[in-house]
Image (spheres, rainbow, N blue to C red):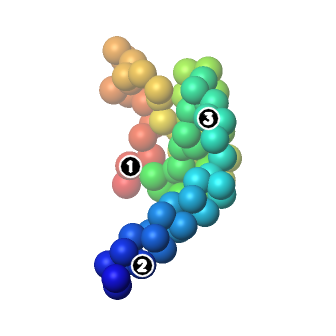
Amino acid sequence: MAEAKKAEVKKAEAKKAEAKAPKKIDAYKQPAKFCSKCGARMGDHKDRFACGKCGYTEWKQSKPNAGQANKGGA
Ligand SMILES: [Zn+2]
């Protein structure tokens, strides 16, 4: 009845979404990183992400001597 119809619609919607979403996922590709300061998409470098908009840099791995790094505080 109504419930069955609902389920059918749900199924159809799921099918639609499936067709829309890309099936192939690049496992090696990391999701885009966005600047926590200005929200711009950050450049993906070997060891860091760099924002070309505001210059914010985020290291991929915590560096042992990153304490003196310019974190842009203020
Ligand atoms: Zn930025």
The response on whether ligand 1 sits within 8 Å of label 2 is no
Residue 41: where, in percent of width, then height?
A: 62, 50
Q: Nearer the viewer, mark 3 or mark 1?
A: 3
34 to 24, vertically: above or below: below
In the displayed image of the protein, which residue is found farthest to the top? 64
According to the picture, the residue beneath numbered tag 1 turns out to be 73
Give the quadrant of residue 19: bottom right
In this image, 48 relative to 24: left or right? Answer: left
In this image, 63 relative to 13: left or right? Answer: left
According to the picture, the residue beneath numbered tag 2 turns out to be 5
Q: Residue at x 42, y 22 (%)?
A: 61
- The amino acid type, in three-letter code, at marker 3 is Ile
Q: Which SS class for mark 2? A: helix
Q: Residue at x 34, y 84 (%)?
A: 2
Q: Earlier in the sequence, mark 3 or mark 1?
A: 3
In this image, 4 relative to 58: left or right? Answer: left
Disc 2 vs disc 3: Cβ atoms closer than 8 Å? Answer: no
